[in-house]
Every structure is written in structure tokens, then in C-alpha cells.
Image: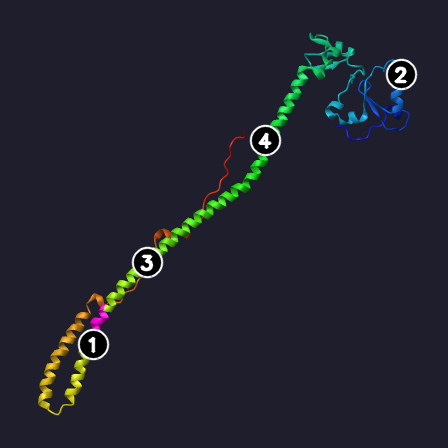
């Protein structure tokens, strides 16, 4: 579009600067109000059509730049060559279009162009493309907005996976502790049985110790001699029982240890990420 403020071309030839109010496409000049009135009175230009300068400034620059006079001969275009797809003046006929077979009067070619089927088709095509582009922009905007929704969905999925893993680990932990309680209970029962057995043995030995002390204090050596003989047999039995305990597995010290599943031990080392994010594309509608 035209952006600068136009000045009257006619006044400018007299070194007068006045703002233009209209544009004559046939004269290809801007005019102020005074020059427009004179332009309308002259026989050569009274039928020229002018447009307000504001409308002229709204024209696309590519349209406003189109000249209606031949640059080479400074003559008005009167003909159109279909072969070269260009307008030309009378002087151009001999120079360039002498052998061209499809020459038409320019007025015949451009007349009614704004209401022609070709112009209407061009408008429709432009509107269709604009609509398609607009739809695609909307789709892209929706695509950009959808990332927020996708992020929330992924967060929810990750939280669900984490919760499922936590729940499963809690269940495994509970099962493990239940097994520990059962194992502890069984070992305690075994230890209690061993303690009871040892306590009975110790009680017998302590009784022997008591009998030896009493025998030592007895005044009769005869009774002491034969009493020691009997007590010695009891001590030998106690010693044999003690020696048998050295190979009795129930006398071992028991500890409960845990050996973690290899998968759990590799969990932190091998699992570097919860999942792989990737961008998947699909064709636009």
C-alpha cells in the first residue's frame, strides 16, 4: 500500500507544494482540488475517472505501480498482445508485435474485468486459501495449547505408575516382615527349647557341685571315698552330654539376613528414566 502523503504533481511543476486530494490513473498524476476542477474541464481529460487519494493509498503497491503509458514511447497503451501477455502502444506494433497473430484492443481485454468470471474465481481462490490458512493457524494454536493437557496427562500417568510401584513395594515389605515374624517366632521356640534343655543339664551339674561340697564336709573318709565314686559317674555323664552338644546344630547361633532381589539391586543402576518422550506427528486435517 501507498504510505507517504502525496503532493499534487501538477502544482509541483510550478514549485508549489500542495496536498493531493485525488488520483487520475489515466494521467498517472496526483491532483489537488483546484487542479482536479481544471482537469475535469479540459476536453482531453474531462472523461478521466479519478479516485480519492485515500483510496489510492489503500491500493496494493503492486497495483499502484502499474503504468498505463508505454515507458519507451510515452504513449498510452491501446492494444494487448495475447502471446506476450502485455499491453503496448501504437509505436510498439512495428518494433515488437509486427508478427504477433493475437492482438486485441486493450479496452476489449480490460473492459468488465472486475465483474468477470476470472476475477470472481481469483477472489474465491484467495478466500479459500485464506480460510485454509486460518484453519491451519487455529489447528496450530490448538496444538500449542494441547501441550499443557498432554503434560498433565503424563504427570498423572507417572504418578499412577509411581503409586503402583510404591503399593507393590509396600506389599512386598509387608510380606517380608510377616515372613520375618514367622521365622523369628520359630527360632525363638527353638532357642527356648535349647535353653530349657541346658537349664536342666545345668541344674543337674549344680546338684553335683552341691553334693561334692557336702561330701567334702562329711567327717567319714570312707563315705566320702565311695560317694565321690558315684558323683564321678554323674560328672562323666554330664561331660558326655556337653560334648554331644558341640556337634548339635541346635546349639548354633542363628541370624536372619536378607538377600535382595537382583532386580531391585539393579533398579537404581539400570533404570535411568521412567519413560522415553518422543514427538509424533500426524498430517493436518
Q: Is residue 116 above or below residue 230?
A: above
* Nearest the eye: 79 or 34: 34
Q: In terms of sequence position, does the residue under pointer 1 or pointer 3 come before the other?
A: 3
* Nearest the eye: 13 or 109: 109
Q: Which residue is mark 3?
A: 178
Residue for point 50% across, 43% down = 153
Q: Secondary structure at mark 3?
A: helix
Taking 85 as reference, is 48 left or right? right
Q: Which residue is mark 4?
A: 136
Pointer 1 local density, CA inside 10 Å: few below 14, some 14–19, many at least 20:
few
Q: Which residue is mark 1?
A: 202
Pointer 2 local density, CA inside 10 Å: few below 14, some 14–19, many at least 20:
few
Q: In terms of sequence position, does the residue under pointer 3 or pointer 2 come before the other?
A: 2
Q: Which residues are magenta?
A: 193-199
Q: In terms of sequence position, does the residue under pointer 3 or pointer 4 come before the other?
A: 4
**Mark 2 vs mark 1: in front:** 1
Q: Which residue is mark 2?
A: 41
Residue 194 inside the magenta-drawn segment: yes
Amino acid at each position: 500500500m501507498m504510505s507517504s502523503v502525496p503532493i499534487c504533481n501538477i502544482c509541483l511543476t510550478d514549485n508549489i507544494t500542495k496536498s493531493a486530494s485525488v488520483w487520475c490513473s489515466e494521467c498517472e498524476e496526483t491532483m489537488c482540488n483546484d487542479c482536479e476542477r481544471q482537469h475535469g474541464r479540459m476536453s482531453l481529460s474531462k472523461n478521466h475517472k479519478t479516485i480519492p487519494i485515500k483510496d489510492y493509498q489503500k491500493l496494493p503497491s503492486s497495483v499502484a505501480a502499474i503504468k498505463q503509458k508505454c515507458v519507451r514511447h510515452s504513449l498510452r497503451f491501446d492494444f494487448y498482445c495475447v502471446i506476450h501477455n502485455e499491453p503496448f502502444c501504437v509505436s510498439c506494433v512495428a518494433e515488437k508485435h509486427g508478427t504477433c497473430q493475437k492482438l486485441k484492443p486493450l479496452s476489449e481485454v480490460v473492459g468488465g474485468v472486475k465483474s468477470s468470471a476470472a476475477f470472481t474465481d481469483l477472489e474465491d481462490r484467495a478466500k479459500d486459501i485464506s480460510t485454509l490458512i486460518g484453519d491451519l493457524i487455529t489447528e496450530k494454536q490448538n496444538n500449542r495449547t494441547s501441550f499443557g493437557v498432554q503434560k498433565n496427562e503424563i504427570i498423572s500417568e507417572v504418578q499412577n505408575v509411581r503409586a503402583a510401584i510404591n503399593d507393590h513395594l509396600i506389599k512386598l515389605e509387608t510380606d517380608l516382615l510377616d515372613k520375618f515374624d514367622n521365622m523369628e517366632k520359630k527360632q525363638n521356640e527353638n532357642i527356648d527349647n535349647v535353653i530349657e534343655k541346658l537349664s536342666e543339664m545345668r541344674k543337674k551339674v549344680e546338684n553335683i557341685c552341691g553334693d561334692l561340697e557336702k561330701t567334702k564336709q562329711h567327717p567319714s573318709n570312707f563315705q566320702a571315698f565311695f560317694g565321690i565314686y558315684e558323683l564321678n559317674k554323674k560328672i562323666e555323664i554330664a561331660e558326655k552330654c556337653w560334648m554331644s552338644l558341640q556337634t548339635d546344630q541346635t546349639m548354633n547361633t542363628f541370624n536372619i539376613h536378607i538377600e535382595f532381589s537382583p532386580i531391585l539391586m539393579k533398579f537404581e543402576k539400570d533404570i535411568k528414566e521412567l519413560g522415553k518422550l518422543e514427538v509424533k506427528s500426524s498430517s493436518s486435517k
